[in-house]
Amino acid sequence: MGDGRGPKLVLLELTGDERGALESLTRGRNTAQALALRARIVLTCAQGLSNSEVSRLLGVSLPTVGTWRSRFVAHRLDGLFDEPRPGRPRTVTDPDVERVVVATLESKPRDAAHWSSRSMAAATGLSQSTVSRIWRTFGLQPWRAETFKLSADPLFVDKVRDVVGLYLDPPERALVLCVDEKSQIRALDRSQPVLPMQPGVPERRTHDYLRAGVTSLFAALDVATGKVIGSVHRRHRQQEFLRFLRRINDSVPQDLDVHLILDNYATHKTPAVKRWLLRNPRLHLHFTPTGASWLNLVERFFAEITNKLIRRGVHRSVTALEKDIRTWLQAWNEQPRPHVWTKTADEILASLAAYCKRIKDSAH
C-alpha cells in the first residue's frame, strides 16, 4: 500500500518465525529500547501500512521508518542490529586488555605495594590513558583497600537473625534500643590558636595538639524515632553501665518492654548486671555476634557525632568536651533522624557466604 507520494514501497512480509522473534524483542525485559522500537516498526509495516502511517502511529520520524523497513527487507532480522560504525580501527587488542587485567589482579610491581596507571603502562607498553580506561571498564581500583573481619562467633547466624528481626519487625508494646559506649573520647586543644576560614582559605590548625583527658559517651538509640538517651562518664566500668541501665529504665514508660541490642563488652555481662536484670525483667538483652559491631545501629550515630563534633572540636578541658557533647545530644533529639535498616538477615548471610567463597577461591 502506498500513500501516493515517493517511490512504491517494497512489500514487507513476515514468516511465522520472524514474527515470533520480533514480538519477543518487543516484550523482552532485557531488550534495548532502540532494538525494541525497530521491531515494532517492522511489525507495524508488515500490517500493510505506509511509512507515513507507521510514522504517525508510532511517533517516530519518516526517515527512521524508511531506514528500518529497507534494512529488514534487505537483511531480514540481522538488519535490525547495529552495523559496525565508521572510524579509526582499534589499536588496543583483546589480548592487550586481558594482559592488563590479569597483571592487575595477579601481580604487583617490584617497587610498590600496588599498581599505578603509570607503572602498569610502563610494564605493558600501553599508554597511561589506555590503562586507566581498561581499569574503569572492569571496575579495577588498585590504589584502594578496605578492611574486613569475619566473625568467628559459633552463634553468628542466630544472632544476626535475632538482631535484624528486631530492626525489621519489632515486637508490639516494646521499645528497641541500640546501646553502646564510645570510650576514650579525647579532649584535645591545638598547640596554637585555630585560624578561622576566610574567602578562598580553609580553616587551618596545627598538626600537633595538647591532651586534656578523656571521657566516655553511653548512648541508647531508639530504632523507631532516632532519639538518643545519652550519658557522659569519665570511666566505663560496670558501675557506669548499671547507672546507664537505670537511666534507660526510668526514661521509658513502664508499660513498655525494652529490648536492648548490645555488643559483647565485658561490662555488659558481669554478675552485678545480671542480678539487676533479674530484678527488672522488662529489659531484654540481645547481643550482636562477636566482632560484628557493625550490626549495631548506634555505631551509625557515633559516626555522626564523631564527624560533626568530636573530630574537629577544640577543647581545653574534659568538662568543656562533655558540655559540648550534651549540647549536641540535645540538638540531635530536637530533630532526630532514624537510621533505617533495609537488609534482611537472609541477604546479609548470603553476602557473607559469597564473601567467604571469594576468600576461599583466592587462597587457591
Image (cartoon, rainbow, N blue to C red):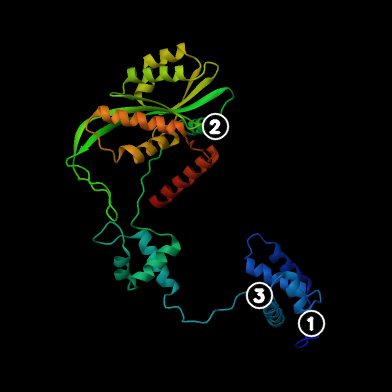
Specify whether 266 is left or right of 58.
left
Mark 1 and mark 2: Cα distance apart in space: 64 Å
Q: Where is residue 362 in the image (x, y as percent from the top left)?
A: 40, 52
Q: Which residue is drawn at 52% across and 25% down?
A: 175
Can residue 292 be seen here?
no
Residue 252 vertical placement versus 213 (above, below): above
* Mark 3, residue position: 80
Sequence order check, earlier mark of 1 and 3: 1
* Dot 3: element: helix
Q: Choose between 41 and 54: the one closer to the eye.
A: 54
Sequence order check, earlier mark of 1 and 2: 1
Q: Residue furthest front?
A: 199
Q: Position of residue 228 (x, y in %)?
A: 44, 29
Q: In the figure, residue 332 lies in which quadrant? A: top left
Residue 284 vertical placement versus 182 (above, below): above
Q: In the figure, residue 10 lies in which quadrant? A: bottom right
Q: Residue furthest top?
A: 279
Q: How crowded is mark 1: few (under 14 residues within 10 Å), some or many (20 or more)?
A: few
- Mark 1 in CB contact with mark 2 (< 8 angstroms): no
Amino acid type, mark 1: Leu
Q: Where is residue 112 in the image (x, y as percent from the top left)?
A: 25, 59
Q: Choose between 106 and 225: the one closer to the eye.
A: 225
Mark 2 and mark 3: Cα distance apart in space: 51 Å
* Mark 2, residue position: 165
* Mark 1, residue position: 11
Sequence order check, earlier mark of 2 and 3: 3
Q: Residue at x 31, y 37 (%)?
A: 310
* Dot 1: element: loop
